[in-house]
């Protein structure tokens, strides 16, 4: 074999090897691209599933929020209605207690119209009516202020006049013009009173 033929064979072998190597590299690249494509498709599928789950969760939370909002609005309306009813009928029990007093007053008034009415019985009926009224007031925390012969207290008494007196200490309530009242310890109306002052020296 000539030297030229030998060189040609070597060159052909090298060319074939290069071609085979190139084909192998192309096949590997193609295989890698296929794997990358499958991974990308798989990842896209996962992302799509996660997105759907997130949407479902968001819809669920939105529905829960809307239900909670509706319940809150219903609660507000119910509270407003209950408050209105409480204000409107706050005196219901108090009025029920006073009805007996009203009835007693009407009976006493009717009895007093009779020319032959027994004054003693009318007096007894009036005392009974006053006792009923006092009990009804006490049930609801109403307390009477009747400070006769007590020291003058400007927190609960209002002096109408001063009277020089030598038989009682100065600043003593000697007469009650109008009784006062407390409601659960809070002053509603002060007692209108006359108060003693030291008698002038003779």
Image (cartoon, rainbow, N blue to C red):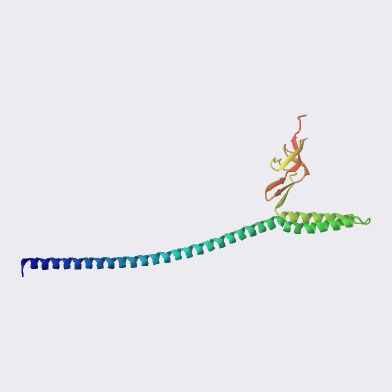
Q: Nearer the viewer, residue 113 or 82?
A: 82
Q: Nearer the viewer, residue 179 or 39?
A: 39
Q: Position of residue 197 (x, y in %)?
A: 74, 35
Instruction: Name which residue lies at 22% across and 67% down.
Output: 23
Is residue 167 in view?
no
Q: Nearer the viewer, residue 81 or 173?
A: 81
Q: How many marks?
A: 0
- Residue 168 appears in which quarter of the rendering? top right
- Residue 20 appears in which quarter of the rendering? bottom left
Residue at the far right in the pictured view: 115
Q: Position of residue 175 (x, y in %)?
A: 78, 42
Instruction: Name which residue lies at 42% across and 65% down.
Output: 48
Relative horizontal placement of residue 133, taking residue 155 as reference (left or right): right
Relative horizontal placement of residue 99, taking residue 21 as reference (left or right): right
Instruction: Name which residue lies at 26% across and 65% down.
Output: 29
Q: Position of residue 91 (x, y in %)?
A: 72, 56
Q: Name above or below for residue 165 compared with residue 28.
A: above
Q: Position of residue 5 (x, y in %)?
A: 8, 68
Instruction: Name which residue lies at 62% across and 57% down.
Output: 76
Image quarter of the N terminus? bottom left
Q: Nearer the viewer, residue 55 or 134?
A: 55
Residue at the far left in the pictured view: 2
Is residue 87 in view?
yes
């Amino acid at each position: 074999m000539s030297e030229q033929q030998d060189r040609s064979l070597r060159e052909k072998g090298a060319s074939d090897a290069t071609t085979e190597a190139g084909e192998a590299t192309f096949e590997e690249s193609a295989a890698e691209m296929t794997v990358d494509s499958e991974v990308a498709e798989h990842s896209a599928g996962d992302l799509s599933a996660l997105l759907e789950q997130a949407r479902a969760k968001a819809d669920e939370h939105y529905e829960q929020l809307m239900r909670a909002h509706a319940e809150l609005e219903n609660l507000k309306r119910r509270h407003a209605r209950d408050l209105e009813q409480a204000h409107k009928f706050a005196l219901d029990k108090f009025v029920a207690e006073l009805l007996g007093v009203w009835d007693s007053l009407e009976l006493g008034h009717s009895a007093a119209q009779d020319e032959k009415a027994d004054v003693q019985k009318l007096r007894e009926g009036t005392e009974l009516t006053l006792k009923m009224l006092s009990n009804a007031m006490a049930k609801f925390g109403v307390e009477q202020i009747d400070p006769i012969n007590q020291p003058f207290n400007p927190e609960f008494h209002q002096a109408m006049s001063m009277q020089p007196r030598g038989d009682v200490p100065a600043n003593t309530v000697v007469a009650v013009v109008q009784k006062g009242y407390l409601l659960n310890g809070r002053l509603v109306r002060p007692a209108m009173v006359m108060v003693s002052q030291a008698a002038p020296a003779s």
